[in-house]
């Protein structure tokens, strides 16, 4: 391989791709990025075997070829070079990189050792608005579990019903679901949440994002970037039946106020793993949040609210803060029934549902 | 104690003071801040036994008293309250804190258990320009050692000679020295570098900073903040004799260029603990920096320079980057003699000296 590329393009592509490299030490080549000439362009790829990301950039190709080089070193090196033309010249397993005032040789590994994700040849194909997808996914993805003990909960569920795409995550303690209009294909996918976190970083100014999937993998294309993720096997929980159809206690209040008093209360909930108690008082038109730590002290904070139903419920303050960060609008509804039933947090958007399971108080 | 204070003042004071709390678990009260009414003001203090910081703020005092409360909880709590009046009411070892919508009780510990640093009654007293002191100290303090094996090297040396105050730090691998005019007192102090790091954070818009010291401690006063530090015992190395009086090789070049090529070269020096080789070439009017990592590859970068003397010297890239971050001006002089003699980095300021010991190459 012998090519010229611009520092700007190569640097941007490496910053998108190199993040997934380096995870598993059992296969050292996974800490490398693959550089390969495809159709007179430079293709830059990295993979951790669950996710593969590829970006193609323009290149002046003098000689075809391919090589893999350490991802972190390559990224740090290119990032520190001045803008302008970079000359890449492969000689066996060495990559010579030259720019004005800079001359380096990086020891690489043969491209043949780099694992290739199987191609998706057939399968459904559809696309949606990139911006709407990004905004929607952001409100959902954080509710997925980080615990591999139940693999299905580490995924984001995509399911179409009557032309709507429902996107949901749950770690069994809380659940987030949002929907997007206009997906006519039959979709039922369970995509790893960390692949979706990468997609959130990748989506930039593109208008559309496209999906193609078989029963093993999904290919997501966003501009010049392609992400392939292995799908998670297993049946996603039938979460819709968890959402209570109505509530005896509903408080409507300023989202900012509820965030403030929850934050303060959480400071006193450190020894109880974030446990706080929310009380609704229709007589005084207020919501109060209380936390007690036998060691350090206690706190009660309140906020003005429109309240229906007098009651109290105990929940994890971090889950409440996460939910409040995800709902839209200036006001928020905090709704609950009995002490063991799910709590609902909702904002302006009718297409977003957030549910938190209470703690025993 | 029963007082009213403003959230703004209390929050600011806690952010200055509370940092030094919490270091040693052997004495739990050290993770608390002391609140005490002194002369109708609220005095807020924390200490780690080596350093004590106190700030006084205005308060509407209804009842005198004192108490200690957990520093981190108190700081986080006050920081999250809205601006406005805060009512503090002490009841035995509990502190009730009330603000609009917020009501807390923090469990404290008797103020009598809080260790008091001995007062400095006599000793020399002098003051200097706060801004000049801050700028000068910043160029010096980072060169102190973090290794307690040689306690004198963990200090910053302050020594007056002929009306000049010399401030110096060395970890035996590099040395930074700067001087300030106009100190007529006889000063010879060895102050812990971490106390000086705190002073850098404390100095704000004050004009003057004052020093008072006996042979055990130094009291540094900056506006409403007082810092007391234990002095380090021991003889500071006679570092001045380490500075070569003249150099056979001198390169003058753009500081920005030298930073860039050193940074890039340091990427290839990770397996050699940062070792890079600087070459001066008077024929080509350039300085080049070379690093070789047998595993990952190698790099050579160069920059245009005015060069006197052809030669090369090996040094730690991190020390060079630290030094380049500390010298003033657009251009820098990189000067050296033989391969085992100290390297000098100098910029615009004649009152700043930075010396780096070479590595064996």
Image (tube, coloured by chain):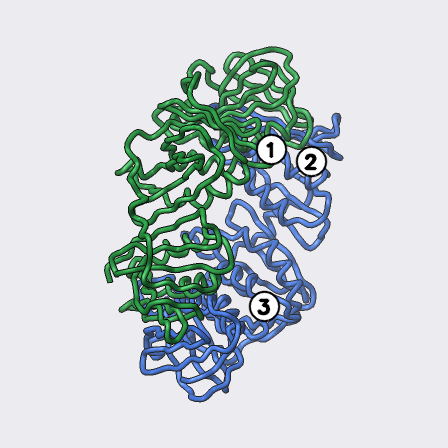
Chain colours: A green, B blue
**In this view, B190 is above or below B323:** below
Q: CA distance from mark 3 to mark 2?
A: 36 Å
SS at mark 3 in the image: loop
Q: To which chain does the residue with label 2 belong?
A: B
Closest to the observer: B282 or A81? A81
Q: Nearer the viewer, residue B338 or B219?
A: B219
From the top left corner, tell me how far across and down residue A167 is, in percent: 41, 39
Relative to A281, residue A32 above or below: above
Same subunit, tags 3 and 2: yes
Foreground of the two, B22 or B349: B22
x and y percent of residue A238 in the render?
Answer: 29, 40
Q: Which residue is mark 2?
A: B249
- Name the residue: 74% across, 26% down: B284
In the depicted structure, whether residue A226 falls above or below residue B194:
above
What whole-number distance in Å separates the C-alpha atoms at marks 3 and 1?
A: 37 Å
Q: Quadrant of residue B257?
A: top right
Identified at 40% across, 18% down, the residue is A118
Marks 1/2 in contact by CB < 8 Å: the verdict is yes
- The answer to whether residue A73 shows anywhere in this view is no
Q: Is residue B309 left or right of residue B97?
A: right
Identify residue for label 3: B187
In the picture, measured across the screen, residue A320 lies left or right of residue B336, that is left
- For residue B313, the mark is 1
């Amino acid at each position: 391989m012998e090519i010229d590329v611009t520092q700007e393009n190569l640097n941007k592509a490496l910053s998108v791709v190199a993040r997934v490299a380096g995870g598993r030490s059992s296969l050292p080549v996974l800490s490398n990025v693959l550089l390969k000439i495809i159709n007179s362009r430079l293709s830059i790829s990295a993979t951790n075997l669950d996710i593969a990301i590829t970006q193609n950039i323009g290149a002046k190709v003098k000689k075809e070829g391919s090589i893999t080089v350490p991802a972190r070193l390559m990224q740090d090196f290119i990032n520190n070079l001045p803008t302008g033309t970079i000359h890449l010249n492969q000689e066996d397993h060495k990559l010579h990189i030259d720019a004005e005032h800079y001359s380096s040789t990086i020891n690489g590994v043969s491209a043949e050792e780099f694992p290739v994700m199987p191609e998706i040849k057939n399968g459904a194909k559809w696309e949606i608005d990139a911006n709407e997808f990004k905004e929607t996914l952001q409100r959902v993805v954080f509710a997925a579990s980080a615990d591999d003990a139940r693999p299905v909960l580490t995924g984001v569920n995509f399911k179409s019903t009557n032309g709507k795409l429902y996107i949901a995550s749950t770690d069994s303690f809380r659940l987030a679901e949002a929907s997007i209009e206009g997906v006519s294909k039959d979709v039922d996918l369970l995509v790893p949440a960390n692949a979706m976190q990468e997609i959130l970083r990748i989506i930039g100014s593109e208008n559309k994002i496209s999906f193609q999937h078989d029963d093993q993998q999904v290919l997501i294309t966003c501009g010049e970037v392609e992400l392939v993720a292995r799908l998670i096997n297993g049946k996603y929980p039938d979460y819709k039946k968890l959402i209570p159809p109505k509530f005896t206690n509903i408080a409507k209040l300023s989202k900012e106020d509820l965030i403030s008093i929850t934050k303060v209360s959480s400071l006193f909930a450190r020894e109880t793993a974030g446990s706080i108690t929310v009380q609704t008082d229709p007589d005084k038109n207020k919501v109060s949040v209380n936390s007690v730590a036998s060691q350090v002290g206690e706190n009660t904070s309140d906020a003005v609210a429109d309240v229906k139903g007098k009651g109290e419920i105990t929940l994890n303050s971090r889950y409440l803060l996460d939910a409040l960060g995800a709902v839209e609008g200036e006001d928020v509804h905090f709704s609950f029934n009995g002490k063991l039933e799910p709590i609902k947090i909702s904002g302006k958007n009718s297409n977003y549902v957030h549910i938190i399971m209470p703690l025993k108080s």
